[in-house]
Every structure is written in structure tokens, then in C-alpha cells.
Image: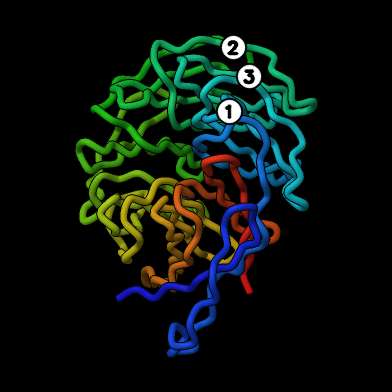
Amino acid sequence: MRRHWLIAPIALCFVFAAAPQTARADASPAPLIAKPAIAVPRSPGSFDYMYVDAARRYLLVAHTGSKSMDVFNLDTGALLRQVNVGSAHGIAIDVKDRKYFVSTVEGVVAVVDRDNLVLNDRPLTPGPGDAMAFDPKNNTVYVDEDAGTRIFTVSGRTNKPGPVITIPQDPEYLNYDPGTDKLYQNIVSTNAVLVIDPATNAVTATWSTLPATTPHGQAIDSAAARMFIAGSNGILVMMDMKSGAIMGQAPIAPRVDQIAFDPGTQRVYCASGTGLLSVVQETTTGLVALPDVIVPEHAHTVAVDPSTHAVWISYGGSQTDFIMQLTPP
């Protein structure tokens, strides 16, 4: 049985009771402590992927319900700007060209100036966009098609659409790893991750994610050449990024969506939307499940600040939306 700790954020419409003393029978510390929830203005609705721009100290949130990319101060949680981009899903950061790219359901990639946070361009893709990755080596943005069979490309320099990569049905999460110089694409329909060479746009390997099924969240430990993949069946696997071998597994909450890896603590945070945030410790020999953290429902995306090790989640309410910071004790 997994152990759960209850957090107590002070929010407009969320109040949690303290966890009973019996919940800490083994004296294990709670892996995260919640700070008060921060209300996000404008239309209440869903969020999608969250990312950290550590150099700018920005928290970037795809606020799908408000059709915006919300930018928060990473240190204070203050809202800095809501950029109207459309029904946002993924976000990619292009440091060299000082841009943020935002994928949308409308089949538009919004190009936002990283310096002044204004919308500058809206190149079209052949279908609705979901997860994104940016390859700084070839200066290309990759956008997987929401529930589709394609990965779209956009030039970071010119904002012009490029070649389309054909893949199996239903891609879910996409990452670029500079260590291996490869793209890694989760495929829900086949319980697999594709390895793509960005130099040729060719799929060079297909690796099974089993025992993790319906893979959604993906995160990378580039230094150790390890990849973490969350199955909707409640299993997190750790995979060797050079061979595809499964190196370890751990139980997590079911229906996890986005996951985030903190290289400083070597922890993987898994947001399920069911009211649980699973925490898994990477070790030299495998994975160790830590106590889950109880959070508000619908918090299915997560980001980590590598400088402070703070964890951020977002979730929609009936009247107001929120972001929340959780910190290690």
C-alpha cells in the first residue's frame, strides 16, 4: 500500500484538514510542503503543460481554458503576463533566438518574444499541436499532433513550417536530449517510445515501455542517460537512453499526465489529476517510491525549479484557477 500525506494550502475554495497522526506511523517525512494557492485571473478552465525558464526565473503555464500562455515570477508566484495565443498545450524555449513557441489546438504555433512577452508570429501546422521539444543544435521546434500520426517542425530562426515526420497513432509526450542528440516520443497506442534522429527526421528505434502502459509523462536525466516514463496504469519505468533497457520501476498514482525531474535531488514528480502527486527517488540501482502528496484534483501537470527544488502545479476550479508551489521540508 502506498502512503499518502495530506497538504494544507490556504486557497479561496480549498481547505484541507491535517493528516491524522497515524499516517506517519513510520516517521517518514512528507516529501513536499504546500504553500498557499495563488489565484489565476481570467476564464476558469483547464491547464496543460508547465515549464520552467530558470535563466529568466519564469514559470510558463499553458492556460488552455483562457487561451493564453501565463508567465509567473518563479520566486514570488506573481503573474507577470497572460499572452493570448489560443488553446495552449505545449511550450518550447528557444534561448538563442529569444523565443517561446506555444502549440495550440487550433493548429497554430504561437511565437512569443522571450524578452518582452508579446506575440510576434503565428505559423500554421497541418493539425492540432500538443507536446513540443526544441533542438538547439538544428534550431528546430518539434510539435506532436494531438491524437494524430505526425510530428510537425518549425524553424526557430524563420518561424517557417518544415518537414512532417510520420509516426504511429496517438503521440503523447516529446523530449529532446542534448546528450544523445535524439528526440524521444511517447506513443500511447503501442506502449512505446520512438527514438528519432533530428539530423534525418528518421525513427531509428522503437522501445517498449512495458510494464508501463498508455505512456504519458516523460522526463530525462541527461547526465545519467536515463529516461523516465509514466504509464497510466500506475507504473513509472526508468529506461536506459542508449539501449532502451528497463532499469527500474516504481508504483505511482494512476492516470499520471506530466512528470518532471529534478537533477539536484534526483526525484521524479508525477502529476495524476486524481488528487495525488507521486514522488519517486532515482538511485544508482533503480527507483524508490516515496510517499504520495495529496493535492487538489485536476492538477495533472507539474514543473520543477532546479535552483530551489520547488515544485509547481496548476489546477482549474469552478470559479477560479490556481497555481501552487510545494517545497521540500
Which SS class for mark 1?
A: helix
Q: Is residue 51 left or right of residue 112?
A: left
Report x, y in % for residue 119.
Answer: 69, 18
Q: Is residue 133 above or below residue 291?
A: above
Q: In the image, what residue occupies the spot 56% across and 16% down? A: 155
Q: In the image, what residue occupies the spot 52% across and 30% down? A: 64
Q: Which residue is mark 3?
A: 111
Report x, y in % for residue 316.
Answer: 52, 42
Q: Earlier in the sequence, mark 1 or mark 2?
A: 1
Which SS class for mark 2?
A: loop
User: Residue flagged by tag 2: what amino acid is it?
Assistant: Arg
User: Residue flagged by tag 3: what amino acid is it?
Assistant: Val
User: Residue flagged by tag 1: what amino acid is it?
Assistant: Ser
Q: Is residue 118 left or right of residue 67?
A: right
Q: Which mark is residue 122?
A: 2
Q: Is residue 186 left or right of residue 223?
A: left
Q: How is the image coloured?
A: rainbow
Q: Is residue 147 above or below residue 18?
A: above
Q: Which residue is mark 1?
A: 66
Q: Earlier in the sequence, mark 3 or mark 1?
A: 1
Report x, y in % for residue 200.
Answer: 39, 22
Q: In the image, what residue occupies the spot 54% across and 81% down? A: 29
Quadrant (top left, top right, bottom left, bottom right) of the N terminus: bottom left
Of the pair 305 and 197, the residue shown nearer to us: 305
Q: CA distance from mark 1 to mark 2?
A: 18 Å
Q: Is residue 67 left or right of residue 198?
A: right
